[in-house]
Image (cartoon, coloured by chain):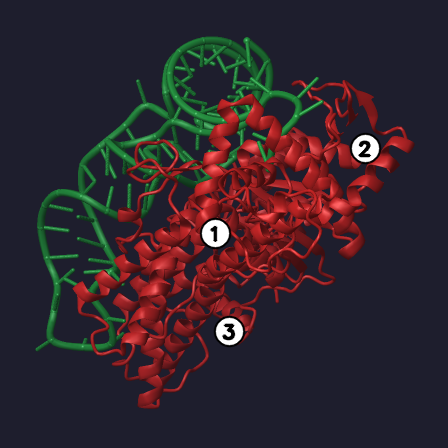
Chain colours: A red, B green
Amino acid sequence: MPQLTQDLSVLVGAAFLEAGVEANYGVVQRSDRPDLAQFQCNGALAAAKAAKANPRAIAENVTARLKEDPRFAKVEIAGPGFINLTLTDQALTDHLRTFADDRRCGVPLRSPGQVVIIDFVGVNIAKAMHVGHLRSTIIGDCLQRLFRFAGDTVYSDVHFGDWGLQMGQLITEVERELPQLPYFDPAYSGPYPETSPVTTDDLEVLYPRASAACKADADRLNQARQATADLQTGRPGYRALWRHFQNVSIETVKRELASLGVHPDWWKGESDADPLVEPMVNDLQMRGVAVESEGALVVPIDQEGDKKEMPPLIVRKSDGGALYETTDLATIIDRVREVDPDQILYVVDQRQSDHFERVFRASRKAALNGKAHLEHVAFGTVNGTDGKPYKTRSGDSVKLFDLIAQAQDEARQRLDEQGIAGSYSSEERDAIANAVGLAAIKFADLTNYRTTNYIFDLVRFTRFEGETGPYLQYQAVRIKSLLRRAEEQGFAVAPVMVTSASERELALSLSRLPDVLAQAESRRAPNVLCDFAFELAQGFSRFYGEHHIMSEPVPEARGARLALCRMVLDQLTLVLGLLGITIPERM
RNA sequence: GGCCCCGUAGCUCAGCGGACUAGAGCAACUGCCUUCUAAGCAGUGGGUCGCAGGUUCGAUUCCUGCCGGGGUCGCCA
């Protein structure tokens, strides 16, 4: 399936070549000035710079040839040497028809695909999921959908935080609360209870308490460290208790992710890398990659030309324990062995950029990552309307469950106000409200560029006007409804056609999809998809207002418009799907 | 203090070497529902793109400095 800009680039490139200039100057892009043209090529300027020639003269030469091509309605030179191109409606129509019925909406499938691992969610076993996990989860989810659609084999891993100091903190905290439990008796050898002594709710209370206590009291911190080390070296009671922590957490997180519509492939965690740590450490030591330093075993990672200090990566603490940089390193070995990935993307908070830089350097130095490109896909923090990290009024972090519930309640209320789904069954109304609430949250998050620290304002997100998830759902639903009606009337779809301004605009948007996906992928930027979805939806709305389709008497014209509607719906469904947003049948 | 990120309309954010009279949404104002869902559409007003230099034919976009905000800086994650 030809991509329009690529197609045009080839065409213009050939014209450049004929004009005696390298063809790769002929790169064509969408016009920055839609009022002047549909497409532009800036190559004449660059070529002139290189050849110390007059850009307008080069442009004249190129355009002379292009003007002979009947597909162009307009070929002009503007300003210092921009080449402006506008296609005829016929050319646009022809192009649209090449992918009107394509299941992939004209997007080529990458073949062979790559193997990509996406490390996301990153929830800590000791904590409930809160707003902080939202971004990693939905950005990571969007990326996994994006790469899969492109043709890659994707493995997404929630990568639980289940092996560090917080485990020791929890263990010692439980011990203080319930010292009579057998887990703490070193002499106990029998089987440990099968049911967990704590629930997720308990953990949510215990962890902050333990964490605060350790911060305030060095002794407590040392106890926690000791417990962590004991856990890691295999103390049976601790392992048994830790299993319970793990099980109750996974259960809860599974439910939460499912309610977000997110389905990871792997439910691994830091602890899964544990068996690989010792062999890795020995290997690194043997190869001289790791060396002793201040009682710990470290991999020096500083390089010449470093602008900042690069402390060595610690593969074994002086107390023998493992840090998360150790398990992150070992996890790379695990992943290379399991699936030999081409890329590993870590969708993790921006603040950990130093950490990843360190792990990546160590990995490369020790040649652990095989052929895999390692990349930290960083994102900014979620703030409240006061600009500080988003908290409840009482100062607690907001639980993801509550957040989703709030948005969905808001959606339900909105439905009531509009009296819109009044005749639907309560099940359908609930399903719609849930989908709309989720769309509000996801779109609001994803529409910001990744690294932006954005302000979370649920009131604004659930307003459902303007550039929001619900608006996009609404537009898609209108198209569905329209197509349903047309079918009921027996109106047939006919070959798509471009004749009016709003159709032209829509056609240009539809032709952009391959470029949009490519850009979203290369920048790992879901907001590119959001922008595009909004452009499509708004373009459709304009078209919808300009043409009353059902009352169009000429069957060809009516059918062509129905075809255009279907193309818009297909792309909207695809792009919203990549964003993890579902479209109800009606709303 | 070193390093990293950010400072664009009243608010929330796009754009990050090109056509600049800088875009969108919200908020304000004006129109448009007896025909396909008005959660919509059309339109008006609103900005010295933090400040000062530099590179360039051309800078919101690149470089330097400064101011303001945030983050981060071996045995936490």
Front residue of A299/A25: it is A299
- Same-subunit check for callouts 2 and 1: yes
Q: Mark 3 lies on which chain?
A: A
Q: Distance between the residues labelled 3 and 2?
A: 50 Å
Estimate the x, y position of residue A377 in percent, counting from the top left: 59, 42
Within 10 Å of disc 3 (Cα), the crowding (few <14, some 14-19, many 20+) is many
Q: Mark 2 lies on which chain?
A: A
Q: Which circle marks residue A365 in the picture?
A: 2
Which of the two discs, 2 and 1, sits closer to the camera? Answer: 1
Q: How far apart are marks 2 and 1 (CA)?
A: 40 Å
Q: In this view, does A170 lie to the left or right of A545?
A: right
Question: Which secondary structure, mark 2?
Answer: helix
Q: Name the residue under label 1.
A: A200
Within 10 Å of disc 1 (Cα), the crowding (few <14, some 14-19, many 20+) is many
Front residue of A51/A403: it is A403
Residue type highlighted by circle 1: Thr
Q: Pointers 2 and 1 in contact (CB under 8 A)? A: no
Q: Name the residue under label 3.
A: A100
> Is residue A191 in view from this perspective?
yes
- Residue, x 32% and y 75% (percent of image)? A428
Q: In this view, does A427 lie to the left or right of A251?
A: left
Question: Which secondary structure, mark 3?
Answer: loop
Residue type highlighted by circle 3: Ala
Within 10 Å of disc 2 (Cα), the crowding (few <14, some 14-19, many 20+) is some
- Same-subunit check for callouts 3 and 2: yes
Estimate the x, y position of residue A156 in percent, counting from the top left: 62, 55
A254 relative to A563, above or below = above
- Residue, x 46% and y 37% (percent of image)? A208
Number of marks in the rendered image: 3
Quarter of the image with the C terminus of chain A is bottom left
